[in-house]
Image (cartoon, rainbow, N blue to C red):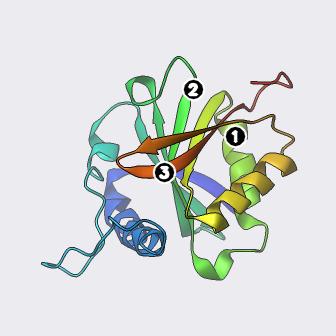
Amino acid sequence: MLHIEKVNADRKEVLKNLMTLYLHDLSEFIENIDLNTENGLFEFDVFDWFFEKEGLNPFFINLDEKPIGFILLQSGPYSNQEYADYVLNSFFILKKYRRKGIGKLACRKFFELYPGRYAISQALSNIPAIHFWKSVYEANSLNVYEKPEIEDGIKVIYQYFKTNSDDTY
């Protein structure tokens, strides 16, 4: 059974461990993601903010009550409020669970829990992520507006869409 669960502070270390796997995977596509040479881990520099600041929320993607991935969601002052209620900062599924429909199902469940206007981006070099998100939009019949941007020196493509309306963005 797939379940989305807000990560409590007592499970912060589990999320931190999953984050290093996520960043390792991303390092294949984004050159400036690198290993911390002091501890041998990939680290997200604002990780603790997701447990300290209102508007930043971490979620586990659980399968049969064990975490197999996560979602980091930005809202309020951490979203582009003119265009999006939510910015999906990060989405990750462990490799052994990919290409089985689990990621698409997790997105569907998440969008049902948090309906609204979304912004999601992928590095243009991350072709697998771009294909995944296009399949999510198609599976959920979402009307998407795309806009290329440069973010922290990285060429990205943003998608904007609404989950609670049939109207185009």
Regarding mark 3 in the picture, which secondary structure is present there? strand
Q: Is residue 83 rendered to the left or right of residue 113?
A: left
Q: Quadrant of residue 12?
A: bottom left
Q: Which residue is mark 3?
A: 155
Total tally of numbered discs in the picture: 3
Regarding mark 2 in the picture, which secondary structure is present there? loop
Q: Residue 149's x, y, as percent?
A: 51, 40
Q: Residue at x 42, y 52 (%)?
A: 154
Quarter of the figure with the N terminus: bottom right
Regarding mark 1 in the picture, which secondary structure is present there? helix
Mark 2 or 1 closer to N-term? 2
Q: Is residue 4 rendered to the left or right of residue 14?
A: right
Q: Is residue 147 rendered to the left or right of residue 7?
A: right
Classify 52 as above or below 20. above
Q: Residue at x 35, y 31 (%)?
A: 54
Quarter of the figure with the C terminus: top right
Q: Which residue is mark 1?
A: 111
Q: Are marks 2 and 1 in contact (CB under 8 Å)?
A: no
Q: Residue 134's x, y, as percent?
A: 76, 53
Residue type marked 3: Lys
Closer to us: 158 or 149: 149
Q: Residue 29's x, y, as percent?
A: 48, 69
Q: Residue at x 79, y 67 (%)?
A: 101
C-alpha distance separating marks 3 and 2: 20 Å
Q: Which residue is mark 2?
A: 84
Q: Quadrant of residue 93?
A: bottom right
Q: Residue 96's x, y, as percent?
A: 64, 82
Residue type marked 1: Phe
User: Dot 3 surroundings within 10 Å: few (below 14), some, or many (20 or more)?
Assistant: some
- Furthest-left residue in view? 38
Residue type marked 2: Ala
